Image: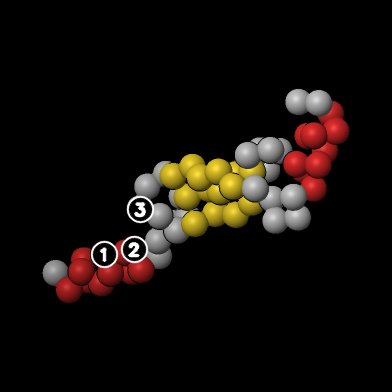
Amino acid sequence: MDRATGLTDSVQADQQELGVVICMNCNEVLFTLPTNGYKKIYGICPDNSCADRKDKSGE
């Protein structure tokens, strides 16, 4: 029984990064986050250069 409990503890300690932060302008994956389930979050690139390209292209 103790072996099974140890296995469960190690699985819980190693949380997967299922959260994804995506740029609203260029759809580039900026980074991932450790979450309990799949989450998609939108943000903007840190340098904001993709917003400048979007404005110039007329989109």
Q: CA distance from mark 2 to mark 1?
A: 5 Å
Up/down of 56 relative to 7, above or below = above
**What residue sits 54% from the left and 54% below the top?**
32
Eyeballing the image, is 44 above or below 54?
Answer: below
**Quarter of the rendering occupied by the C terminus:** top right
Left or right: 53 in relation to 45: right
- Three-letter residue code for mark 2: Val
Residue nearest the viewer, comparing 35 with 24? 24
As drawn, is 25 to the left or to the right of 43? right
Q: Residue at x 82, y 38 (%)?
A: 53
Q: Residue at x 35, y 53 (%)?
A: 36
- How far apart, in angstroms, are the residues tagged by discs 1 and 3? 15 Å
Dot 1: element: helix
Q: Which residue is mark 2?
A: 11
How far is mark 2 from mark 3, CA to CA?
A: 13 Å
Which residue sits furthest top?
59
Residue 19, given in percent of the width and then of the height, sits at 47, 50
The residue furthest right is 56
Residue type of the residue flagged with mark 1 = Thr
Q: Secondary structure at mark 3?
A: loop
- Residue 7 seen in the figure: no
Q: Are marks 2 and 3 in contact (CB under 8 Å)?
A: no
Disc 3 target residue: 36
Count neighbours of disc 1 (C-alpha within 10 A) and say few if under 14, some if 14 to 19, many if 20 or more.
Answer: few
Answer with mark 2 or mark 3, whichever residue precedes in sequence.
2
Marker disc for residue 25: none
Q: Quadrant of residue 10?
A: bottom left
Q: Is residue 35 above or below residue 54?
A: below
Of labels 2 and 3, the one closer to you: 3
- Tags 2 and 1 touching, CB below 8 Å: yes
- In the rendering, which numbered label is found on residue 8? 1
